[in-house]
Amino acid sequence: MTFEEILREIGTGQFRSVYFLHGEEPFFIDRIEQAVDGHALPEAEKGFNQVVLYGKEVDAITLLDYLRRYPMMGERQVVILREAQEMKGLPDLAAYVENPMPSTVFVVCHKHKKYDMRTRLGKSLQGKNILLFDSKKLYDNQLPDWIAGYAKSKGIEATPPAAALMAEYLGADLAKIANEVDKLALNLPKGTAVTPAHVQEYVGISKDYNVFELQKALATRDLPKVTRIGAHFASNIRRNPLIVTISSLYSYFSKVLMLHSLKGSPDAEMLKALELRSDWFLKEYKLAATHYTPAQTARVISLLKEYDLRSKGVDNDTTNTGEAELMKEMFWKILH
């Protein structure tokens, strides 16, 4: 089942005996746990029919005692095990998972890594009325679509430029992204089409000094604008780390180079190959392709690789050339 399907099922009052949530992305695990917490029991029952335990602090015998209890004056009890990856006795729960209590909803939150499905416990998680969920990190190119979907669930519409801007600046921290989308939903009327201007106002991203403006300036070889943005980035290097800027530009110019190889292809084919969501983005890449030949684009990519290594201390004396100076130097070389 997908994350959304699991939430819908919980929302209708259907619960599994065991929810084993594992994987690298903590956001989905936290939200499924919160959904069970919010729907499985009335608030008045939680004091005696719900317990939250932590892997570092609980042993298998104590946990099994909780799991095998009967609910008090209610239909079910809920047992939540957080930080399950820290529990030494976790494999000892296999026998319980193979024959769980029908009146217990057991939620296991095993974060930051997958559990080994080759073990007895792993194999037992294939049983009836057990939900096994692999919480995977999203790829960078999946973030804008995810942001748009999450915004829709909150009653607002994230336009492609706004979703892309948030993905670029907030990175892959889904909890942080969700918090900022929630903030937008609180401040904007239902049904609002969120624009980059809204993002800049409520999320706090600079209108003139952001990576999208930098890409546009580099795409058109606008030296004065690149210089202004570069100076701003360099003076605020903690908020604009060189390695993040390089990563963004590498992705951008890689698409420009790919676009050169697709010359003459239909726009639909270009959009699919470049994994772009709208013509709005494609126009910008086409503009960049008119200012950089394939050889020049390849040279820019090579420069970005060079400065990525130098930012990590390879062939660079960071005591004399810090991040800010490297950034200015890199921008100058891209344009000359």
Image (cartoon, helix red, strand yellow):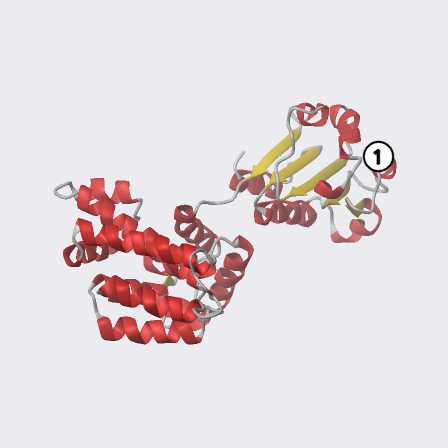
Q: With respect to residue 179, does 62 lie above or below?
A: above
Q: Name which residue lies at 70% across and 41% down.
A: 85
Residue 323's place in the image compared with 56, above or below, is below
**In terms of depth relative to the viewer, which is nearer, 73 or 62?**
62
Q: Residue flagged by tag 1: what amino acid is it? A: Leu
Say which residue appears at 30% left-offset and 66% top-offset.
331
Q: Residue 235 placed where, x, y %?
A: 43, 76
| Nearest the eye: 142 or 216 | 216
Q: Is residue 195 visible?
A: no
Q: How many marks?
A: 1
Is residue 263 left or right of 153 when viewed as pictured?
left
* Other residues around mark 1 within 10 Å, as few (<14) / some (14–19) / many (≥20): few
- Front residue of 57 and 245: 245
Nearest to the observer: residue 48 or residue 60: 60
Q: Position of residue 69 (x, y in %)?
A: 86, 36
Please provide percent x and percent y for residue 149: 43, 50
* Residue at mark 1: 64
Q: Which picture quadrant has residue 217?
A: bottom left
Q: Can you say which quadrant of the picture contains the N terminus?
A: top right
Residue 104 appears at what percent x and percent y? Answer: 77, 35
Asked if one can make out residue 196 in the rendered structure from this viewpoint, the answer is: yes
Q: Quadrant of the C terminus?
A: bottom left
- In the picture, measured across the screen, residue 306 lies left or right of residue 203, that is left
Q: Is residue 301 left or right of residue 83?
A: left
The quarter holding residue 192 reads bottom left
Q: Secondary structure at mark 1?
A: helix
